[in-house]
Every structure is written in structure tokens, then in C-alpha cells.
Image (tube, coloured by chain):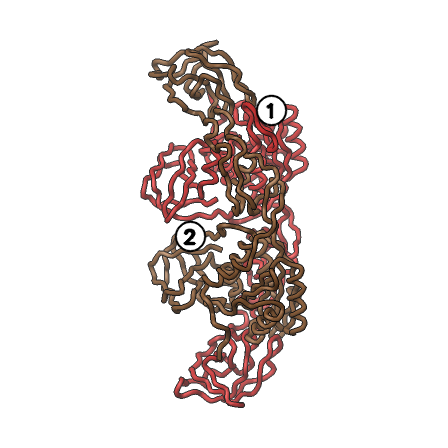
Chain colours: A red, B brown
Amino acid sequence: MSLFLKAIPVDSAVRIVREISSPMPEEMVPIERSYDRVLARDIPADIDIPGFNRSVVDGYAVKSSDTAGAGESVPAMLHLTGMITMGTEAGLEIRRGECAYIPTGAELPGGADAAAMVEYCDSLGDQVLIKKAMAPGENVVCRGEDFASGENVLPKGRRLSVQDVGVLAAVGINEVPVRKKPRIGVISTGNELVEVSTIPTGGQVRDVNSYLCSSFLLSLGCEHTLYGIVKDDRDLLRAALRTATEECDGVIISGGSSKDDRDMSADLIGEIGEVMAHGIAISPGKPTIIGRSGEVPILGLPGHPASAFVVLLIIGRALISGMTGEENGRIVTNCAVLAQNIPSSKGREDYVRVRCKEGMAYPLFGKSGLLNTLVRSDGMIRVPAGSEGIETGEDVEVILW
Amino acid sequence: MSLFLKAIPVDSAVRIVREISSPMPEEMVPIERSYDRVLARDIPADIDIPGFNRSVVDGYAVKSSDTAGAGESVPAMLHLTGMITMGTEAGLEIRRGECAYIPTGAELPGGADAAAMVEYCDSLGDQVLIKKAMAPGENVVCRGEDFASGENVLPKGRRLSVQDVGVLAAVGINEVPVRKKPRIGVISTGNELVEVSTIPTGGQVRDVNSYLCSSFLLSLGCEHTLYGIVKDDRDLLRAALRTATEECDGVIISGGSSKDDRDMSADLIGEIGEVMAHGIAISPGKPTIIGRSGEVPILGLPGHPASAFVVLLIIGRALISGMTGEENGRIVTNCAVLAQNIPSSKGREDYVRVRCKEGMAYPLFGKSGLLNTLVRSDGMIRVPAGSEGIETGEDVEVILW
């Protein structure tokens, strides 16, 4: 008695979801709303940054050669010829034996090649004593040293971080070309499910997966439409799938937890479109379905929330990246030493939840349906399909939640 | 010649921003929009979860004692008395010698204490052969095993993760009590600044800090109002500060990069309110100002974007946490081995940007005004105030961006 079609390896499943997902069209968003969006194009610097030789200290612009050998006891004495102001051209030229006051961030005047910090200088009327020998370029950022005009500063497919948006400002990108947010429809199936606002009675459970999915989608910058709970009725479920695939860019349907429900979901995806995979060699999460209707990818999750969550992270994230055009998914990992043996079966990837403390990873074994280990853990460890487990004391990589 | 008031330790600065920030009022948001919000109250389970003894497999509900000694060659033969359906009460009682079909997720009937997986069973009309001895409780999650009614499932002050929202659904929280998003006003000062859409000419630079701040605020779930660039004019700047402190819950003003500009910001904060600190023993980021006007905290950042960014992460994050009520800031760190000596001065905390590769952390030294090392690095290492540096080969903790 086979519960599923032949389970395919995780790598193949990821390849399939990448194949059936295509990047969303481009849209322009104002720079102050571009954080966490995915760049649709490479961004070049439009100008040299900085656009001029810039002092990074408050002090005096000098010719470094004029300060050769200078020190506390033998300062160089230079003639003060002016003050540079912020935001304007320097407007003067430093000749041998001369200096000019310069504030942090101002343009170094012609002829000068260093800025002496005010802490090492004494001003005496129109003479300035420089008590430190300056090297050429000292305390100066040269024109184009940060970014050269034309240079690519941020690559297409990058999810914009806080500092990336700062760089966009520096290179003059007021409107940012990003991928539109995909809208993903979410359907929960199962006769046992009741709304969150309902008190479950005998045999009923609340619909957790709709909200696990909506949060997951928000975390990856997607929009979502919740289609709510659909009872295990072929006509109702087919209608919901049709509506969702018409209204959305992708659909996540979280399965009934029983075999019959799961098979019905797969059947119906096959009716309105195509099933590409039914069963993945992953634990937890084996009864996962990958399909599509026209150009709209469909991911069928297991009913157990804890299993659904692992599949969202491993397969769902790859699917969404295919749609947002994100090049490097932002899986954050941490290294740790395993505190307890993890046994595993060859031929499937196991994901074991762990708690991290002082560089050690403590596996939280337990029934895959439990939510409490999900919120009490820090992440999970992947046991590759070719491995029979990981032993105490081995270095492991924890995929952080 | 002292550039700043006495610089205070980073710890003191963090303590001050915590003291002058108070948690925002509570508001209710729909569960499907609660991801990444901060809980304003402890959340207890309203019911036992699961609310019944639940099978985690498709198979047969049995009395485990009936299967004692059973195996492939000596199966236990049980009388099939019914089928449990999903989402309803089991509605039957298992007596000695009996079993009932049960799907994954359904309620275990009275009298049964285990569920035998269908893979280990053969059905022969109304007889079922069980080919494996079952332990009491096997393949069953007991009532209340995940969460017991009344138990705290999520603490006040927690920023809701994907899986946390799943738990909220399980415990019936349809509307979630969270802290309102603080609205933070952002002002950039400096005569050298021009709009992002402008091509800078001699001595001018584009306003990067407004967008670094707005992105930072979005990353922590805050709203922002950008007040744009204010030239270094006391009246204009005082007016902008007044407006921002009236309209917002907090204000970030990013300083002119020169000493005079910084001093003017501090003066004006003193005029309209109170300066609590001017100068922090942190590098980069020393010329930081902490103040307030009435109940509205004000953070004055250094003008250089790269310095401003470090101050946002170390001081700004603590300030925002005080307002959102977040208990544990979500600084993500990774362990690595230092690939190159980092020298440092005693008496200040140094933050050095690093790139991580294969467990090694490579310091990116360089002028603090550069943006390119910000986007090309993975995080930063903190060198504590009491240390003179960190040596090659030492274990370090990288604060990831």
C-alpha cells in the first residue's frame, strides 16, 4: 500500500519549483519605500563618489611635503590663506608653505594632498603650526574612491538591505526598479478545521496553516489572499483552486492531514492543471505536492503545521524566490556543536529542530505535529539524504528561523 | 581643544535611550497582519492543544495490550468495529480485541491508547492483522501535550515570527494585541547636502542618511516621516526640530559632518528640550547626541553614513526597542575565526566591518566614510572598550547586518 507517488529528492523539488516560477514584472517604487524589495536591474553609480577629494577630519588642508619631519617639538609653520566652507567648491589653491582651514566633509583645495587633524595643529593668527608629518592622501577620501562612475554598485536580484538603500541614495536612484510583490492565494482544506475564532469541539482543530502561510509570505515580501477553510468536497475545493489560480500569481494549498484529503488535492490540481511532484524525500514534509495551472505555480503543503513550516522554508522559499527574482535567498545560518546524536534514515533529508545555547545545538525531538517545539527552538539542522545521522560533538550548521 | 562634551560609554548611552523611551500604546491587529509586530500582552492558551488524543498516522486505533508480542510472523488479529472520521468525535469505544480505522489527525476513540500505522497492518474483511507490537501512546499526541489550557504560549514583548503567528491561530487569537508602530521623524542637516535627484557639484553630496534612517526604521517596523534636508541655519533647524517633535513619537537628526554643524544641533536640542549625552565612546560614531523634547526622544547621528549606520544599530535599535516594547532585540550573530589582527584603543568600543567566508571573518579596514565596505561586508565585530584589540585566530562573534 503506497501512501504517495514516488518521493523525489529535495534538490529535484527545488529545481522543479524554480522551473515553474517566473519573475514578476518590474515596477518603480520611491526610494524611501524600497527597503526589503528585490532589485529588478543592476544599479550603476551615475557619478564618482565622492565627487571630489574630501577631508574626513576637521583641520587644515596642506601639501604633505611641507610637513616632512614635523613633530611636537619641531612643528611645520604654514601660512593660513583661507577657510573652506561646506558644500561649495574649495575655490582656492594651496601653494608651497600655505594651508587652509577645512571642515570634515569639505572639498580639499587644489595643491593640497592631505588634511592635518585640528588636534595636531596650533593656530597663531595667520600662521598654523602643524605638529605631525602628513603622508600624501592622509585623512582624505579621493574622488571616486568609494564608487567610480559607471561601476555596478548593487546587482539585480538583490533584496535591499538598510545600507543598500543608502547606496541607492548616493548614486541618485530616487525611484527604484524592483519586482512587483507576488500575490499568493492561500487555501486550507480539511473537515477537521475550524476558524480561529471558534472553540473546537470533538475532533476539530483550528486553522493554523492559513496564518503560518500568510506570515511566511509577509516575511518574504509577498501579498496574500486568504481563501479560508474549504471542506473536503471535490466541487468546493476545485472551485476554490480555480478562483485562487485566476486571482493570484501563485497558490499554496495546505492539505488535509489524512491520506484521502491529500490525494484529493493532488487529483484536483491534476484536473485543473498539472501535478509535477507528489511526495518529496524530506522529513517532516513528505506529502508535499508541486503543480501548476497555466503559468500559476501551486504548492500543496502537508496538513501538520510543523511539517508545513519546514516545507515552506525549504521548498516554498525557493518558489517565492523564483517569483521575486531574489538571487540569494536569505537563509541565515549559524555554526554550532551538536549536543546529542541525531539518527536518520538514508534516502531522505531530515530536518531536526534545535535550540542553541553557548555554541551548542540541542536537538528537540518530538512528534512532528507539535507547535511548541517550533516556537521554543532557534532553528533546524539538515541531515543530508546520504547520511545516517550526525553524532554528538560534530560541527553543524543551524538554519535559523 | 575639545571636539565634544565628555564621551560616555556605550552601555551608559544604551541605558539613557532606554530611560527616555516608553512603550507605545496597544492596538489590535488582525492575525493575518500580525507578523513582525511586537506583542503587548502575554498570550495564554485558551484550550488544551490538541483538544483530544490525536492520531499522527493513518492506521488503526488499538489497545496496545492487544498487540503485545505481535510481529511480522505472529500478527495480532483484531476485529474491525468502525472507521473514525475527521473533525468529529470518535463516537465509539474500543474494547479488548477490537480496532477501528483512524486517519491522521483524527480523535483516538475511548479505550484505545495507540495507533498502528497502516503500513504494518493487513485488512481482511472485518479482521485486521497488526504486525507490530505497539507501546502505550505510540503515534498519539495526547490532549494538552502541545499546550495546556491557561499556559503562557508567547510572552509580551516578543516580535512575532512566522511560527509564532501559527501558535496565535492555535490558541484562538483572531485579533492580536500589539504595540502601535512608533512614527519617527527624520531630519538631515548640512549645507553640503543635495536631494537624491540632484547631480552634486563642487563640494556637494547627496543626502544618504534620510534613506538609511527610513530603511532602518522600516526594518524595525516603525513608520517614518522624512523632513528632508535642512540647511545649517539655526532658525530653520529649530523650526524643523519643533515640527518633528510635535508630529512624531521620536526624532532622528543626522548631523552635519563638521564640528560646527554638530554643535549647532546639540545647542538647538538643548534649546527646545534637553541634551542627555553629546559624545559616545564608540568608533565609528563618536559625535552622537542623545536628547529629548518633552516625552519625545531625539537621536543625533554623525553625518558620515557609515558611522551613522553603526550608531543606528547600537544606539538607535535600543531606542526603538524601548518604544516598540520589544524584549530581545533581534541582533543575529554568527561565530567565526578572525583572519587578521584588529588593533584598537582602550576606552572606546570599536566596530569593525568584516566579510565572512568559510568560518573566517576578514576585517575590512578603511575610511569610515566609505559606503562600499558597508554593502560588501556581512556584519561587524565589536571590540570591547576594555580591549586593545583582537588577534588573528581568535574566535569572534559577528553581528550580522
Residue A302 is at least partly visible in this image: yes
Query: Please, is residue B334 above or below residue B141 in the view?
Result: below
> On the rendered structure, is B60 left or right of A148?
left
Query: Please, is residue B245 above or below residue A344 in the view?
Result: below
Residue B281: horizontal and vertical position, in percent?
Answer: 45, 67
Which of the two residues, A391 or A39, is positioned nearer the viewer here? A391
- Residue located beneath label 2 in the image: B334
Give the spatial CA distance, label 1 vs label 2: 45 Å
Q: Mark 1, chain letter?
A: A
| Residue B158 marker | none
Residue at image x 64%, y 31%?
A: A241
> On the rendered structure, is B91 left or right of B63?
right
Residue at image x 65%, y 24%?
A: A235
Residue at image x 61%, y 64%?
A: B293
- Residue located beneath label 1 in the image: A232
Mark 1–mark 2 CB contact (< 8 Å): no
Q: How many marks can you see? A: 2
Q: Amino acid at mark 2?
A: Asn
Residue B63: horizontal and vertical position, in percent?
Answer: 41, 17
Residue A16 is at least partly visible in this image: no
Q: Quadrant of residue A227?
A: top right
The kind of secondary structure element at disc 1 is loop
The kind of secondary structure element at disc 2 is strand
